[in-house]
Amino acid sequence: MRYSQMLLPTTKETPSEAEVISHQLLVRGGFIRKLTSGMYTYLPLGLLALQKVTEIVRQEMNRAGAQEILMPMVQPGDLWEESGRWKKYGPELLRFRDRHDRDYCLGPTHEEVVTDIARRELQSYRQLPVNLYQIQTKFRDEIRPRFGLMRGREFVMKDAYSFDMDDAGASKSYEKMREAYFRIFERCGLDFRAVEADSGAIGGSYSHEFMVLAETGEDTLVICNECSFAANVEKAAITLPEAEESQVELEAIAKVQTPGKKKVKVVAEFLGVEPKDVIKTMFYLADEEVVAALVRGDREVQSVKLKNLLGANDVEPLEEDQVWQATRLPAGYLGPVELPLKMVADQEVMRMINAVAGANEKGCHLTGVNPERDFKPAIVGDLRQITMEDRCPTCGGSLGLKEGIEVGHVFKLGTRYSEAMEARFQDSDGQEKPFIMGCYGIGVSRVVAAAIEQNHDDKGIIFPVPLAPFQVTILNLTPKDATFCEASEALYSSLQQQGLEVLLDDRDERPGSKFNDADLVGIPFRVTVGKTYAKEGKVEVRVRKSGETLLFTPEEAVTYLSEQVRLALSV
Ligand code: ATP
Ligand code: MG
């Protein structure tokens, strides 16, 4: 491609709303333009980068045996009624009516549509397993669209859905996708981790998120410093060490006056104990019900774990006055002994001995509280946020925190949709059974943004070679001079003959702005036809990532670049 003929409007201005670097650079580099909140046009360079990701994803899906289809973006509300999600999905689902007053929505995901296909087209176990995928525009009316391509309302997703006849088959399909995802993100040249998103109750993990490590990530990950374990901090499972036999004698409960002492630290100090000896009682509105969450005083409640333990759709923390309004109980002085509310206790709480807890009476606390003896929570489980003092659940190693961007998600669905939508096949024993399903998403457009978040410097983007819209750019510094033009043109066609993707900067611009633009848009290799060519017939090759510069004859440059690009694509 010739720069002079390409719509590649680079700019020095950074849009004020662009908070993250990928958003800034995508706009400044002329990759995207905003239409309206959360919706972008891909200009030629942006589309080339997007297509790079798309192609890698497509190749690896096909290699894993998935079949590409394309489903409509507009979906009938009836199907969503069948699955039970029409009411449940919330305002991210953009709903509208057609001229016949029928309900429709813009697809945020395609479980309903693909399950409808399966129930129509797959009748027998002989047709299974099947994995169908598409690469398509999704629409989610995100409450806070931001960060450019990272969280759009309209975005490109690859979504795949597997149909199996039994659990063993479903596990195989899941594993295949997980492996394909490793290949995809490795081929994209990204530093990523697969994190366990949810530890299934039936052993093993049934959901993994793929996270690109970058400071601007919206997710926090716990990473083992010694092994490959990584988990979302919201879900990182805590395994307690074996309980030790305690020799401490259990005290009787006693009420003590603690006027004005509400916070754990204050109460502990006042009573001369450690925060870890106090039972922290927090209150949440779980769907419609007020529940109490109990953790040790030196711990924090992890609300996602609470939500999962309760099987609730939504949990919201309650402030003191809200607790009072909802229960007429004096928050700040509340504890689990004879608390007339549903209680969820962290596993650690049940090991506490002679603890301090609120007395459910204004200005009073209890000492000598012994959980096993003195109260019975409705649920005991892993409720607290993991800390850096905890050990790796896999190898016992030390833990650290990192920020990550979720670029992919593999998930075992089981029969959630096939049951609800009566999608069944006939098994070898003649019985009708629901399909066992899995779903597997990749945020294709988000991958472009994540790659930039991870690979940039103060001059601009540093694309990993596999995702670069062009692999090489040739800068002709003197386009008015015939010798330079000839040399640049010859290089341009030789490189293209080698199968390389080349942008020839043939514009009549100052050298400075050509260098700046080349750095800004992040093309991995730059070849300059300038002074050294006039003097000694050599061109300068510069590697964007390392800054290394090499002098070559044009022929040597072609050999070097073909070799380097081939190497970078071969991972
Ligand atoms: P998030 O927690 O970021 O909202 P999600 O759990 O809603 O993600 P999924 O429903 O699993 O996401 O969608 C599959 C993939 O699509 C995600 O892993 C992510 O890469 C991408 N994705 C989701 N929402 C957006 C969005 N608003 N903009 C761009 N990509 C998105
Ligand atoms: Mg979401």
Image (tube, rainbow, N blue to C red):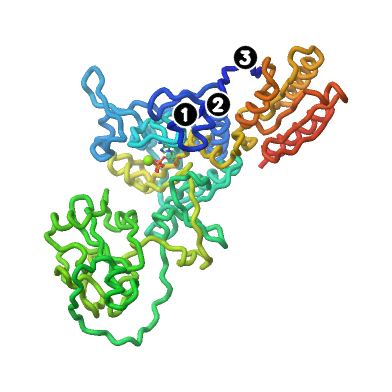
Mark 2–mark 1 distance (CA, rounded to whole Å): 10 Å
Q: Can you tell which of label 2 and label 3 is closer to the viewer?
A: 2
Which residue in the structure is indicated by mark 2? 12
Q: Amino acid at mark 3?
A: Gln
Left or right of 236? Residue 179 is right
Which residue in the structure is indicated by mark 1? 15
Left or right of 265? Residue 540 is right
Give 61 or 145, whichever is nearer the viewer.
145
Question: Where is residue 186 drawn, in percent x and y?
Answer: 59, 44
Instruction: Please report contact status of discs 3 and 1: CB closer than 8 Å, yes or no.
Output: no
Q: Residues within 10 Å of mark 2 (few under 14, many from 20)?
A: few
Mark 3–mark 1 distance (CA, rounded to whole Å): 25 Å
Query: Can I make out residue 514 in this image?
Result: yes
Q: Secondary structure at mark 3?
A: helix
Q: Amino acid at mark 1?
A: Pro
Question: Where is residue 466 drawn, in percent x and y?
Answer: 63, 35
Q: Residues within 10 Å of mark 1 (few under 14, many from 20)?
A: few
| Vertical position of residue 137 compared to residue 256: above or below | above
Which of the two discs, 2 and 3, labels the residue nearer the N terminus? 3
Left or right of 374? Residue 382 is right
Seen at 56% across and 20% down, the residue is 9
Q: Quadrant of residue 125?
A: top left
Mark 2–mark 3 distance (CA, rounded to whole Å): 20 Å
Q: Secondary structure at mark 1?
A: loop
Question: Where is residue 110 drawn, in percent x and y?
Answer: 37, 34
Which residue in the structure is indicated by mark 3? 5
Q: Residues within 10 Å of mark 3 (few under 14, many from 20)?
A: few
Farthest residue toward the left?
A: 328
